[in-house]
Image: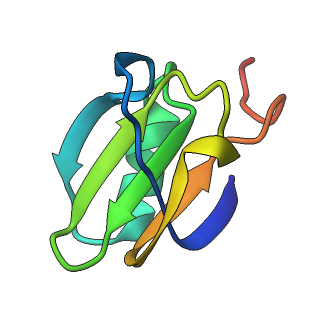
Amino acid sequence: MSTKAGWQFQCSSSSCSPLAIVIVSNLRQCHMACLAEVHCRAISFHKSSSNCELFADISNQNGYLVSNMDTITMIVMDNTRFPA
């Protein structure tokens, strides 16, 4: 996964809404939650609240990013999941 510290997804359309929001203890658990969900393509982890947003349909990944120093966003890199 590629990491974008200080950025979060900000979506005005339902095509970019989170697939799920889970509470986790740390970034690694958020990362693992995404990798365990076959449709997950990206996460936004909010450090202060421990909210982990899982995203499935992020067609314009960088176009939806806004600055937020409390958030770390990670995007699954194409062709890196096993099994595909």
Image height of 15 relative to 77, above or below: above
Q: Position of residue 4 (x, y in %)?
A: 63, 67
For the rendered model, the colour scheme is rainbow
Q: Residue at x 76, y 41 (%)?
A: 77
- Name, please, the residue furthest toward the front: 12
Going by the image, does 56 lie left or right of 71?
right
Instruction: State the image quarter where residue 17 is shown.
Output: top left
Image height of 11 relative to 47, above or below: above
In this orientation, which residue lies closer to the viewer: 5 or 79? Answer: 5
Instruction: State the image quarter where residue 80 is shown.
Output: top right
Q: Position of residue 7 (x, y in %)?
A: 52, 67
Q: Residue at x 29, y 53 (%)?
A: 52
Q: Position of residue 56 (x, y in %)?
A: 48, 24
In this orientation, which residue lies closer to the viewer: 29 or 18? Answer: 18
Specify the quadrant that holds the C terminus: top right
Q: How many marks?
A: 0
Q: Position of residue 14 (x, y in %)?
A: 34, 19
Going by the image, does 58 lie left or right of 9?
right
Instruction: State the image quarter where residue 37 is shown.
Output: top left
Image height of 10 relative to 41, above or below: below
In this orientation, which residue lies closer to the viewer: 51 or 14? Answer: 14
Q: Residue at x 29, y 76 (%)?
A: 47
